[in-house]
Amino acid sequence: MSAALRITNLVKRFGGLVATDNLSFDVEDGQSVGLIGPNGAGKTTVFAQIMGEHRQTSGSIELYGREISSDSTPERIRRGVSRTYQVPRPFTDMNVLENIRVGLMPNNIWQMITAKPRYQQETEIALSVGFTETDLQKTPGELAMGDLRKLEMARTIATGTKVMLLDEVFAGLTVAEIAQITVLIQQMRQDGMTFLIVSHDLKALEPLVDKVIAINYGSKIAEGSFNEVLNDEAVRSSYLGAA
Amino acid sequence: MNLRLTHFLMWLAFIALMFAIPEFVSKGTLRTLIFANFLAIFAISWDVLSGRTGYISFGHPFLIGIGAYTSAILTKRFDVPIELAIPAAVAMTMVGGVVVFLPALRIKGSYFALVTLAFMELMYQLVQVIRPDLTGGTRGMSGVQTLTRGAVNGYYLSVSLMLAVALSMWLLMRTQLGTALSAVGMNEESVRGSGLSVTKLKLFAFLTSAFVAGLGGAFYVHYLGSIAPRALFDINFLFTIIVAALIGGASTIIGPVIGAFFLTFLLEYLRPYLPGAERYFIYGMIALLLYMYEPKGLIAIFSKGWQRLRGGAGSEQSSAS
Amino acid sequence: MQIIIQGLLLSGLYALIAMGFTLIFSVGRVLNLAYGAYLLIGGYVYFTISQTLGVPKLIGLFIAAIVGCMVGLLKYRLLVKPLKGNHVAVEISTLILAVVLQAGVVFIYGDSSKILLPIVAGVTQVAGASVTYNLLAATMASWTILIGLYFFVRKTHVGRAMQAVSMDTRGASISGVDPDKINMFTWGLSGALGATAGVFFASYTQLSPSMWVAPLIISVAVVIVGGIGSIIGTLIVAHIVGFMEVLAVAVIAPELRGVFTMLLIIGVLVVRPQGLFGREEL
Ligand SMILES: Nc1ncnc2c1ncn2[C@@H]1O[C@H](COP(=O)(O)OP(=O)(O)OP(=O)(O)O)[C@@H](O)[C@H]1O
Ligand SMILES: [Mg+2]
């Protein structure tokens, strides 16, 4: 069977800069894959291409065996892939439930007018990512960083995604928040979600991934189990070089 | 839709109040109120687009002008009956809305505001030179057919139109669509990242705004009976519309209505004390200070005051939006 | 020939008008919609000082520039700074301010427009075209100021700090430049430039309370089309706009003078939002 997400010979140039350099990898259905690399390696750019926020220069992106390169972002989301952002981007004047509501909405003006919000589902999603009842009416300004990351994930879940791309989920979090998000991701893995996770915090990433892909200057330098990749000579020197 | 009985009662009280007004005030005041009604319609139209989606339009008179001119030209030059001219004018304005929408596909923020300003200036200059036999050129047109005679009838017509627009926009904005449009104003990328087509939402906002602007513009010209380019495509007119929406409270429906009435009456009540141009000076200063003090508008000031009155007990938001 | 000379002169004036607007847009990253009001103030202050009180013209021009500078500083302190970061709010409040100032002028000077006597009287013939010394003086002043500004920005300490702030506010403040001071300075400078341009503009057209709109639109066109904050771009596009206007008047119809400017703004913003000449440097 075909992979949930298959990237083949992906290239992205920004002017003279090659941000993604002939990158290929697979993420199997239900698998959880880590994507690592030093600052500026091009991880976020890969996400942006998968979501269609940037068009790739060449190469293909397949979701469940179907080429999605010519689809718009909302179309890709409907096909089951969705991402979170390195810097959370909530709707600042809306509370937690309303933020999730936007993710749940049908992409159809008429239905937006006629259909009622699915209040129960909003609440269920909010609670499932670890919000408490009292959090539900809070606006993003009143939430801590960990909560904002949860809100990003909640909105992503609300779109009904099957493949979730998480960009730097652990950045800026306290130890307790990291633990909470770890439990959350483990839970979703058991429920069958497919993950591609970018993280600088390798210790936090370790228990969450079946395999790791390391990139530098946009091209793949290693792929394998967490330990294999971390012990790889090229990976070690790329991190040292960046540090 | 999330409608509550209190909302229903508040609207009922508001409508009853508006319809009772002619019993209590003079004809002169009524004329002022008519202008306030039209200003409220224009401010709502501006707000549907700019207050919600954050695409600030500095060219709303462009849309209003299309509606007004189309209907005036059709009735006066081609003897089209008014019942047909107004829908045609609204349709024409919606075409104008699409024209304004096109740049919004690529640019936003200050750049978009400037393009719309350029649209307004362009329209101002073109109206005077292209087919002056139709548009009346620099002098505009007078003797346009009017719909009503006398202040009382004019008031009833304008207030009905204003209430119909306000109520239907209010209902529309309380649906999920309203939420989605506001979301576009807060963060366009996240709306796309939530799986919604931002282009569709924006187009809808532009068309709705143009619909209301065209309707208001057409009825306005058939109330005034005349039209002049300098009065219409004018920064001062634009200023009044934007300030009405902002002073009242952007991104609400009742806000622009309150703002329109506040501004109109401020201007009217300054008249006895300051007969000349100083009036506009004071009026502008008040608008500026109010805006600097509370960018969310009068409605935010009222609802804060109300909450303080209730001892901050009710945590319920006053959701007149 | 007449067209070329007319075009050059008008373009010089337009470049001067647009310069102060460019400075604010590139350093402060805000659209100052009240920019046209500096021209208004400059024109009327000069009118009062020189024409009503009979003070020598150069002093009148100087005082107009000082007043413009002070208005710029006040605007920055009272309006722009408190609204920090909120561009929409700055734009809307400057728009309101412009309307307020216009009303203020009507209040003091009345509604009707006034003729400003030429700053430099006299007419000469250049290659068969009649040229007023006044417009010639405006163009020369404009070129002097532009060249001065160009070297000021490149060669002086303050000028380089302005460049730094325009490129990256946070980076500049890390490297020891106080963006607030530089912003203050730029607003003051922009006000002085605007007021000076206003005197020349008013003597070219006439003095009226609504004279701020046209220069604002011209500035917007020049700045947008030229690319934000590019002095060279400003200069080039001022000439494009100036020549288009002169051509439209001479070849097509005087009423259409502004139409092409509008079409240019719309076209460029939609097709190439970064302007024809990019937006990188001051
Ligand atoms: N829109 C863009 N235009 C030009 N260059 C870009 C753009 N986006 C990213 N880049 C460049 O592409 C490279 C990869 O950036 P990217 O953000 O994908 O890296 P990253 O691995 O996510 O880094 P980080 O760990 O800092 O998040 C960088 O050199 C960056 O400067
Ligand atoms: Mg990144």
Image (spheres, coloured by chain):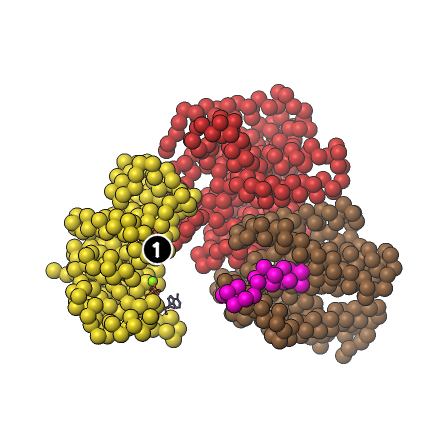
Chain colours: A yellow, B red, C brown
**Which of B42/B215 is in front?**
B42
Where is A103 relative to C133, above or below?
Answer: above
> Residue B166: x and y, percent?
49, 34
From the image, which quarter does the N terminus of chain A lie in? bottom left
> Can you see residue C179?
yes
**Where are the magenta residues, as a range?**
C171-189
Q: Secondary structure at mark 1?
A: loop
Q: Is residue B266 above or below residue C213?
A: above
* Residue shown at 58% from the left, 42% from the top: B293
In front: C90, or C184?
Answer: C184
Task: Identify which residue is drawn at 45% across, 59% down.
Answer: B106
Point out the residue furthest to the front here.
A175
Q: Position of residue A59 (x, y in %)?
A: 26, 69
Tell whether A53 sits left or right of A230.
Answer: right
Q: Position of residue A40 (x, y in %)?
A: 34, 68
Residue C177 highlighted magenta (yes or no):
yes
Q: Residue furthest top?
A: B23
Give the dominant element type of the magenta stretch: helix, strand or loop.
helix
The residue where tag 1 is placed is A172
Looking at the image, the residue that sits furthest to the bottom is: C127
Quarter containing the C terminus of chain A:
bottom left
The subunit letter for the residue under badge 1 reads A
In terms of depth relative to the viewer, which is nearer, A115 or A122?
Answer: A122
Q: Residue at x 71, y 35 (%)?
A: B270
